[in-house]
Amino acid sequence: VAGQLKDATLQQVVTAGVGFIHEGMLDSNWDAVTQLFRDGSLSVLVCPFDLCWRVKESSHLVVIMGTETYDGRERRYVDYPISDLLHMMGKASRQAIDSSGRCVILCHTPKKEHLKKLLYDPLPIESHLDHYLHDHFNSEIVTKTIGSMQDAVDYITWTFFYRRLSKNPNYYNVQGTSNEHLSEHLSEMVETILGDLEESKCCQMNDEGDVSPLNLGMIAAYYYVQYTTIELIASSVTAKTKTRGVMEILSAASEFASLPVRRGEEKNLRILGRKLKYQLPETSQYNDSNSKALILLQCHFSRTTLSTDLRIDQKKIISEGINL
C-alpha cells in the first residue's frame, strides 16, 4: 500500500505505522491513510486541529499537542476554540469497540487550571446572532418576512438571541432585564441595522417605518453576498474600471476578511508581491487577509506556482470570487 501513495514522506512514515493527513494532500492519499488507520494497520494518525471537524476517525487515545494557533492578522498566538477542543476530546473512544476513551492535552502549565474549568464546568451557550443580523435582515426583507421595523423586532423575539438577553444582559450590553430595557435595546438595534442597510442601498424605509428591498439587497440575498461587499462593489465599479481595479475591489470583499495568514507566510507573500503584474496599493499589509487575497488572485491569472497551503487558500478565493 505504501508504494501506491504519491507522497514520498508519507510512504516512509506509513511503513513505521504512522500516518498523517493535511488539507493540501491528494484525495487518494487521504482515503488510503484513513482506511489504513481504520483497519488497524496504522497505530498513529496525525492531523492539524483545523481538520478536527472533517476527520471521521476515532481512537482509544487522543493526544492534543498544544492548545494555541498562530493568528497572522493579530500577529500573536490565540487559543483553540473551546468547541474544537471538546470535539477533539470526543474522538477518544471507538464506538462498539472501546468501553472508555482517554484524551491527553499537552499545554503550558499556567493554562492547566483554566482549561480544566472550561472543559469540566458547564458553560452557558451565548448567541452571536447580533453580529450577523444585517445580512439576516436583508434576506428576510427580500422575502417579505420583514416589512417594517416592528416585524424586525418580532423576528428577533423568536430567536435564541432574545432568550439569552434577559439571562445574561451584561454579555449583550443590555442595561437591565425588565421588558422596558429589552424593548429599548431591541428597538435601538433594529433601527441601527435598518439604517445601515438603507445607507448601503439594500433597502429603503419610509417615515412610518415600513421597509422594502432595493436591487442591491435582492442581489446580495440571491448570491449570499454580505451587504458591505455589495455596497463596496456598487460604489467602486464604474464603466471605466479596468482589470487591476476589478481585482482590487474583489479582494477587498468582506468575505475574504477571515482568510488565514499563517506564521511565516508574510515573507512568502512579500516575495510573490514583487513578481505581480500589477503592484499592490501602497496601503497594503502582508499580514492582511484582503491583501493576501489580492496577491493570490493575481497569482491565479499569472499561473504562478504556489505552496500547498497557499494553493488551498487560492482555491477558496477563486470559488468565492466567481460568486462575487
Image (cartoon, helix red, strand yellow):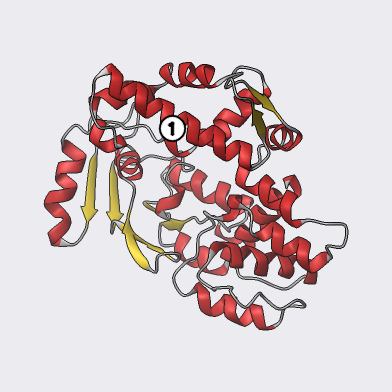
Q: Nearer the viewer, residue 51 or 265?
A: 265
Looking at the image, the residue that sits furthest to the front is 207
Name which residue type carries label 1. Met
Q: What kind of element bears circle 1?
A: helix
Q: Nearer the viewer, residue 252 or 297?
A: 252
Left or right for 61, reference 258: left
- Give the quadrant of the N terminus: bottom right
Q: Percent position (x, y) of residue 221?
A: 67, 32
Q: Is residue 230 visible?
A: yes
Q: Percent position (x, y) of residue 46?
A: 40, 56
Q: Nearer the viewer, residue 286 or 99?
A: 286
As drawn, 207 above or below 48: above
Q: Percent position (x, y) of residue 200?
A: 64, 43
Q: How many marks?
A: 1
Residue at 72% in and 70% down: 299
Residue at 30% in and 31% down: 125
Residue at 61% in and 17% down: 145
Q: Where does label 1 land, which residue? A: 189
Report crowding for label 1: few under 14, some 14 to 19, many 20 or more residues within 10 A (C-alpha). some
Q: Percent position (x, y) of residue 78?
A: 33, 59
Q: Nearer the viewer, residue 318 or 132?
A: 132
- Residue 18 placement: quadrant: bottom left
Looking at the image, the residue that sits furthest to the right is 239
Q: Is residue 308 visible?
A: no
- Residue 171 placement: quadrant: top left
Residue at 59% in and 62% down: 290
